[in-house]
Amino acid sequence: MIKVVLTKDVDKLGKLGETKNVADGFAMHWLIPQGFAVFDDTRLARKLARLRASLDQKVSQASEQAIELSKKHHTKSAQRISQKIAKDAKKINQLKTT
């Protein structure tokens, strides 16, 4: 078994910055040549952990912004629909009275 640090998310194995023990052949013939992992190095592991934290923070900020935009859009759409309904109701009432 070889200890590697993942440089990208790998399905069914782990996420960026995680340290994993993998089979020698898997590391030497697939993970490392494809750029998914590097040999475990303490400095690199710390650097990747900081990178992962930074990416997680950016993702959460983007998610919050998306939620805010969707709330604003939903509110504006609801207001437009309410205004249309009010206009239509007013027109219907005018037709009924004539």
Image (tube, rainbow, N blue to C red):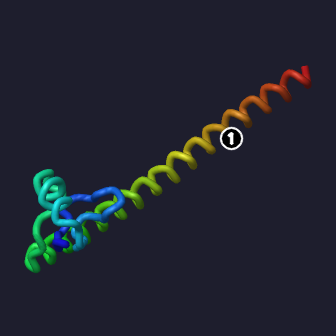
Q: Quadrant of residue 88?
A: top right
In the picture, the quarter occupied by the C terminus is: top right
The amino acid at mark 1 is Ser
Q: Position of residue 24 (x, y in %)?
A: 16, 65
Q: How many marks?
A: 1
* Residue count near mark 1 (Cα–Cα under 10 Å), binned few <14, some 14–19, many ≥20: few
Please say if 74 is above or below 40.
above
Q: 4 or 7: which is nearer to us?
A: 4
Quarter that holds the N terminus: bottom left
What residue did someone put label 1 on? 82
Residue at 83% over, 26% down: 92
In the rendered view, does 28 fall on the left or right side of 97? left
Q: Secondary structure at mark 1?
A: helix
Q: Nearer the viewer, residue 23 or 51?
A: 23
**Residue 62: percent from the left, percent from the top?**
35, 57
Residue at horizontal 90%, vertical 24%? 96
Residue 26 at what x, y percent from top left? 20, 59
Residue furthest to the bottom in view is 42
The residue sitting at 84% across, 25% down in the picture is 94
| Residue under the image location 36 percent in, 64 percent down | 60
Q: Is residue 93 left or right of residue 82?
A: right
Residue 22 picture quarter: bottom left
Residue sitting nearer the eye, 51 or 39: 39
Q: 1 or 85, which lies in front?
A: 1
Rendered location of residue 83, percent (x, y): 66, 38
User: Which residue appears farthest toward the right when viewing the image?
Assistant: 97
